[in-house]
Amino acid sequence: MKNTAIYPGTFDPITHGHTDIIERAARIFQNVTVAIAANPGKAPLFSHAERISMAKQVLCNMNNVKVVGFDGLLAEFVKSQGTSLILRGLRAVSDFEYEFQLASMNRHLYTELETVFLTPSEQYSFISANLVREIASLQGDVSQFVDAHVVKALQQRLQRG
Ligand code: ADP
């Protein structure tokens, strides 16, 4: 069993679906590192620093979980952390094709690398950060899908336009 699992993603913003996966992983692995990708190509709503700060606030009570930012190739980042284990979430069959391709590519780039998939509780299986941003931009209530800190950040960001 590896000690540290790296959970990479954009987390724009962190949702209850992400947190559910992190809680499950924290019970399996000694340490979980939530690795927030800069991902400028995806033109995130929140800056890299904001996404890191929100995730830190949401996860602050979880002792064996840390949040870090990274830029560049995930395989290189995982290697730099002295581990070879990536964690990803699978919601539905629609996630599978992309996740399968990503896992295969990452292993191609770093042979020892393994990707472990966890599924969320059913009540979170339909949440995506994309939908949360879209609902919030239309003034819909997202408080069932994200932490109160994130609700506030979304309101502030979207009010500022
Ligand atoms: P990325 O841009 O890398 O896909 P995301 O922040 O959208 O970043 O997602 C990070 C990981 O979390 C992905 O593996 C995604 O499938 C998973 N994920 C996102 N939302 C959920 C959810 N509601 N339940 C379980 N896994 C999820």
Image (tube, rainbow, N blue to C red):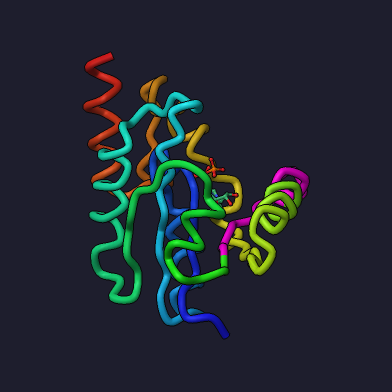
Using the image as rendered, state which of residue 22 and residue 155 is in the foreground.
22
Relative to residue 129, is residue 107 drawn left or right?
right
Question: Is-magenta flag for residue 69?
Answer: no
User: Toward the viewer: 161 or 72?
Assistant: 72
* Residue drawn at (34%, 75%) of the image: 64
Span of residues in magenta:
86-99
- Residue 144 visible, this angle: no
Q: Which residue shows up at 42% across the image and 48% down it?
A: 15
Residue 53 vertical placement versus 44 (above, below): below
Q: Position of residue 145 (x, y in %)?
A: 43, 46
Q: Is residue 120 visible?
A: yes
User: Residue 147 at x, y = what percent?
Assistant: 32, 50
Please report the residue visible at 61 percent of the width from the left and 59 percent of the height from the top. 122
Q: Quadrant of residue 94?
A: top right
Residue farthest to the bottom, as pictured = 1
Q: Quadrant of the C terminus?
A: top left
x, y percent for residue 118: 61, 65
Side of 114 relative to 57 (left or right): right
Above-or-below relation of 25 to 13: below
Q: Quadrant of the N terminus?
A: bottom right
- Number of numbered discs overlaid on the protein picture: 0
Given residues 82 and 54, the one toward you in this image is 82
* Near-viewer residue (43 or 132): 43
Residue 105: percent from left, percent from top: 71, 49
| Residue 96 in magenta stretch | yes
In the displayed structure image, the side of residue 147 where residue 128 appears, left or right: right
* Residue drawn at point x = 58 percent, y = 58 percent: 88
